[in-house]
């Protein structure tokens, strides 16, 4: 028996990808499961190899098989190649086993000639359509098959339009198009020295040869070299019958999803047009009808379509986006693919498909993009209103959500207006810890400077508040209280709207809609928890944040930054007194004022967290961040402390540092001002003992020392903390257990992690500082060049958002290995911003960390990402 070079779609199967190419195998599969796919045939990849073996010639046997199969195709479609009454037209596409760009483009409407064009006119009752298709076919065929440049045809088209004074192609009449067809044929002749082939069979054989030749064009070869694809496997050619939706009132075309792509509702959702071609739906010239209306006009087709849609969904086990055409009362499915959907829809579809028994819980967990959960947890703009709005500027999408309100340029002004019930947006060049109250009260925050880990970005994410940071195209004048974007000037009290998920900024107000956390969210999260190995903690330093995080499923606090507690209106004065004290006695007196306040903060947090672990970090930022900057505050402090203003100013000046992020901060503060660390340790231990007793629970506080680079630093502070803790325990007659650990955020700490482990109970990787110090990029200034670095390909992503696995990640990995070698039970987590980034979470999973800690609103993202990491890396 002769070798089989050509297969009808109904003869192939999904498993024959190597022989039929990906597209061909898929068309066969759809045909085999009983879907009404327009019939067609596939010339195999082996025929391509044979073509090359024969010196780029189709053998007689291959040609004869193509012709035989064509006959069968004619039978199947009840149409005939070249027939005036009922012409068969086909599309021709390449299709290798591995999807590969760079090969031949699709040719549509092959089979058109001077006779068949009349047949199409009769069938569609639309001569303009027929001739427009014909001239397009000649151009496409000439370009794709013979490489005649497109512009030669475009010139002819433009000339004709100009002669007639037309602006658009749509103004061309049938007669114009007939002229164009002749001109196009002339161009063909001029270029090839032969007539345009009018016999459909000849057109087809030429097209098949062109597909085979395109296997070895330069682009395809480069692609294969790049991706290590063998040059010997060849491509298949798919020849599929064309169907027309514009053949009268029993024809039509449409697009539909098997479920609602915005809500996920399990009901076919789509639109169709009677007597129209696909382009008419997309072009939006006529208003399509909703798919249910198909039931009124063609009930049988509607039933068949619904059944096919269900079959497709069952077969592919996911929501499908289907293109269909009805040709004279016959339904055809032209294409199906996995449907794009919103986060809400994605969640509902995944959960409901598990409940329907269609997919497993693992698959559902894998199907939802963790990052998209953000969309569900924050307010967003009214989808109709936002469509009508154009952004005036774009900054970094620092913290998701949407916010609209009146702009204010200082924290005080934002607080005052918010307290009067106004919706406010705080606009600053950049924020500092002093702005915390204003940030808390505002609906959203906009800064013109700073990156994704700038103060504004980190704090806003922590608060779950919308923030656009580092918008360099706006100019902010905090003194004049104006901002400008190009020629637009906005004053205090003007409305703006921020989209923290895209970084877009809009003038005026746009309504927002609140998130609705349906039961599906909870279900998916529960399944994620079943699969994940990483623990999920949160970075929280207020009772409100802690509560939010617990609601979202946090299993503990991985980082409680104590500095934010120092900025509260009622206590900043005492903090300032502590800083400017010139004797230990004075300092201790000021610290005594702070102690009960800190203790109370911790008590509130412990109460909310219950027995869950809470890691509290000792004071980290440089002291100058707390000192007064305006004259009024300086005068007040000078009076209270009885220090002359000039001396106070000198003192303030002496606290200034050239490079504060590498200066007097972190554990260096605790070593030089041990009274601060003692006060904090006392506040933590007293709070833990009291809440343990009051609530009758076991609390094991974790006290964390920041910025350790040498073992000795931690050793000294460990002793100091233990002395205080033991004293408090004795005073309170308590047996409370506690842990003392450190942040690992300095490269030196990573490479000496075995030494440091000797004096640490736990490690928490501060990947913000670790990234800053490993790259030598300032966290607050990197925004200026990161995007340029990404554009030229130096950086693939912002390393402050997603961990740089090759560099910073390697240090983390090394520290984990060294740490565990020295102390096998050393508990380790990460509390930098990367703890909420899905790609980084997968890396931390593989590294063997025990938990990740992230801002409250990212807790669900982290739960899902951790589950996906575990499922992706199952051994
Ligand atoms: C870090 O450096 O990663 C960290 C969590 O600490 P901070 O951002 O407060 O410096
Ligand atoms: Mg840090």
Image (cartoon, helix red, strand yellow):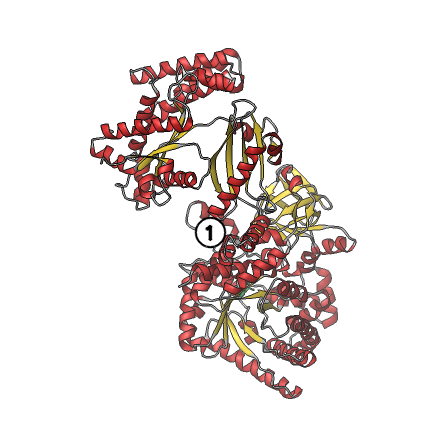
Question: Which residue does the image show at 24% across and 30% down from the upper left?
Answer: 61
x and y percentages locating residue 382 in the rendered image: 67, 44
Q: x%, y% of residue 514?
A: 68, 51
Which residue: 46% across, 74% down? 710
- Say which quarter of the image contains residue 29: top left
Whether label 1 lies within 8 Å of ligand 1 gets the answer no
Left or right: 538, with 439 as reference point: left
Q: Residue at x 29, y 32 (%)?
A: 212
Residue 238's place in the image compared with 750, above or below, is above
Quadrant including the C terminus: bottom left
The answer to whether 455 is drawn above or below residue 572 in the figure is above
Q: Is residue 815 visible?
A: yes
Q: Nearer the viewer, residue 776 or 39?
A: 39
The reply, left or right, for residue 155 in relation to residue 605 is left
**Helix, strand or loop under label 1:** loop
Badge 1: residue crowd in 10 Å (few <14, some 14–19, many ≥20)? some
Q: Nearer the viewer, residue 666 or 96?
A: 96
Quarter of the displayed picture in which ligand 1 can be seen: bottom right
Q: Residue at x 31, y 25 (%)?
A: 206
User: Residue 397's x, y, as percent?
Assistant: 57, 49
- How many numbered marks appear? 1
Answer above or below: position of 584 versus 145.
below
> Which residue is outermost to the left?
54
Relative image position of residue 2 (x, y in whole percent)? 23, 35
> Which one is in front, 349 or 638?
349
Quadrant for the N terminus in the image: top left
Q: Which residue is mark 1?
A: 797
Q: Is residue 59 above or below residue 183?
A: below
């Amino acid at each position: 028996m002769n070798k089989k070079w050509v297969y009808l779609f109904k003869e192939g199967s999904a498993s024959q990808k190597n022989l039929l190419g990906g597209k061909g195998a898929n068309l066969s599969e759809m045909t085999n499961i009983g879907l009404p796919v327009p019939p067609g045939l596939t010339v195999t990849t082996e025929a391509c190899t044979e073509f090359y073996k024969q010196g780029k010639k189709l053998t007689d046997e291959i040609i004869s098989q193509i012709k035989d199969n064509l006959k069968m195709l004619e039978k199947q479609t009840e149409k005939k190649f070249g027939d005036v009454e009922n012409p068969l037209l086909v599309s021709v596409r390449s299709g290798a086993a591995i999807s590969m760009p760079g090969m031949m483009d699709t040719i549509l409407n092959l089979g058109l000639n001077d006779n068949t064009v009349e047949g199409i006119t009769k069938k569609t009752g639309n001569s303009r359509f027929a001739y427009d298709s014909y001239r397009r076919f000649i151009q496409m065929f000439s370009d794709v098959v013979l490489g005649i440049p497109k512009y030669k045809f475009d010139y002819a088209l433009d000339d004709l339009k100009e002669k007639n004074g037309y602006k658009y192609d749509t103004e061309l009449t049938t007669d114009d198009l007939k002229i164009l067809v002749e001109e196009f044929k002339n161009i063909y002749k001029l270029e090839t020295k032969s007539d345009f082939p009018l016999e459909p069979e000849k057109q087809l054989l030429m097209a098949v040869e062109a597909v085979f030749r395109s296997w070895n064009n330069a682009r395809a070869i480069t692609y294969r070299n790049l991706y290590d694809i063998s040059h010997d496997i060849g491509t298949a050619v798919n020849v599929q019958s064309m169907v027309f939706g514009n053949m009268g009132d029993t024809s039509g075309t449409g697009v539909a999803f098997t479920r609602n792509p915005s809500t996920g509702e399990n009901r076919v959702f789509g639109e169709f047009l009677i007597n129209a071609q696909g382009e008419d739906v997309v072009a939006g010239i006529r208003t399509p009808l909703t798919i249910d209306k198909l039931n009124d006009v063609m009930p049988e087709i509607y039933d068949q379509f619904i059944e096919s849609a269900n079959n497709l969904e069952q077969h592919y086990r996911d929501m499908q986006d289907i293109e269909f055409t009805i040709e004279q009362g016959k339904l055809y499915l032209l294409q199906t693919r996995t449907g794009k959907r919103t986060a809400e829809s994605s969640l509902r579809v995944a959960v409901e498909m598990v409940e329907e028994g269609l997919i497993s819980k693992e698959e559902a967990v894998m199907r939802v993009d963790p990052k998209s959960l953000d969309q569900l947890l924050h307010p967003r703009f009214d989808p109709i209103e936002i469509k009508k709005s154009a952004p005036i500027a774009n900054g970094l999408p620092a913290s998701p959500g949407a916010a609209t309100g009146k702009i204010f340029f200082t924290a005080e002004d934002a607080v005052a207006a918010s307290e009067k019930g106004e919706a406010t947006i705080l606009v600053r060049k950049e924020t500092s810890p002093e702005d915390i109250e204003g940030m808390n009260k505002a609906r959203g925050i906009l800064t013109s400077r700073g990156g994704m880990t700038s103060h504004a970005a980190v704090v806003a994410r922590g608060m779950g508040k919308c923030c656009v940071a580092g918008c360099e195209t706006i100019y902010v004048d905090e003194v004049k209280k104006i901002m400008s974007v190009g020629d637009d000037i906005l004053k205090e009290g003007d409305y703006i709207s921020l989209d923290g998920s895209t970084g877009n900024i809009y003038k005026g107000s746009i309504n927002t809609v609140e998130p609705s956390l349906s039961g599906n969210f909870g279900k998916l999260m529960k399944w994620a928890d079943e699969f994940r190995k990483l623990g999920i903690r949160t970075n929280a330093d207020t009772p409100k944040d802690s509560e939010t995080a617990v609601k979202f499923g946090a299993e503990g606090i991985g980082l409680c930054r104590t500095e934010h507690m120092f900025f509260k209106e009622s206590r900043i004065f005492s903090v300032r007194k502590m800083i400017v004290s010139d004797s230990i006695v004075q300092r201790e007196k000021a610290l005594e004022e702070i102690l009960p306040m800190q203790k109370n903060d911790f008590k509130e947090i412990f109460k909310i967290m219950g027995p869950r672990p809470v890691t509290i970090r000792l004071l980290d930022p440089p002291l100058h961040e707390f000192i007064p900057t305006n004259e009024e505050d300086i005068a007040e402090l000078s009076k209270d402390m009885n220090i002359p203003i000039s001396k106070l100013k000198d003192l303030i000046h002496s606290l200034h540092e050239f490079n504060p992020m590498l200066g007097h901060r972190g554990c260096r503060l605790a070593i030089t001002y041990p009274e601060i660390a003692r006060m904090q340790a006392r506040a933590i231990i007293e709070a833990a003992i009291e809440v343990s007793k009051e609530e009758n629970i076991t609390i094991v506080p974790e006290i964390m020392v920041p910025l350790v680079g040498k073992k000795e630093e931690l050793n000294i502070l460990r002793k100091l903390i233990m002395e205080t803790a033991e004293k408090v325990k004795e005073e309170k007659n308590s047996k409370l257990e506690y842990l003392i650990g450190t942040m690992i955020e300095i490269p030196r700490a990573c490479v000496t992690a075995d030494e440091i482990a000797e004096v640490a109970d736990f490690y928490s990787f501060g990947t913000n500082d670790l990234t800053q110090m490993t790259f030598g990029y300032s966290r607050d200034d990197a925004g200026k060049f990161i995007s340029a670095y990404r554009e030229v390909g130096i950086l693939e992503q912002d390393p402050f958002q997603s961990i740089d696995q090759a560099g910073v990640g390697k240090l983390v990995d090394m520290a984990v290995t060294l740490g565990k070698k020295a102390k096998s039970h050393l508990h380790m987590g990460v509390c930098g911003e990367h703890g909420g980034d899905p790609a980084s979470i997968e890396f931390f999973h593989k590294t063997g960390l025990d938990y990740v800690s992230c801002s409250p609103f990212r807790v669900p993202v982290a739960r899902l990402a951790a589950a996906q990491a575990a499922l992706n890396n199952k051994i």
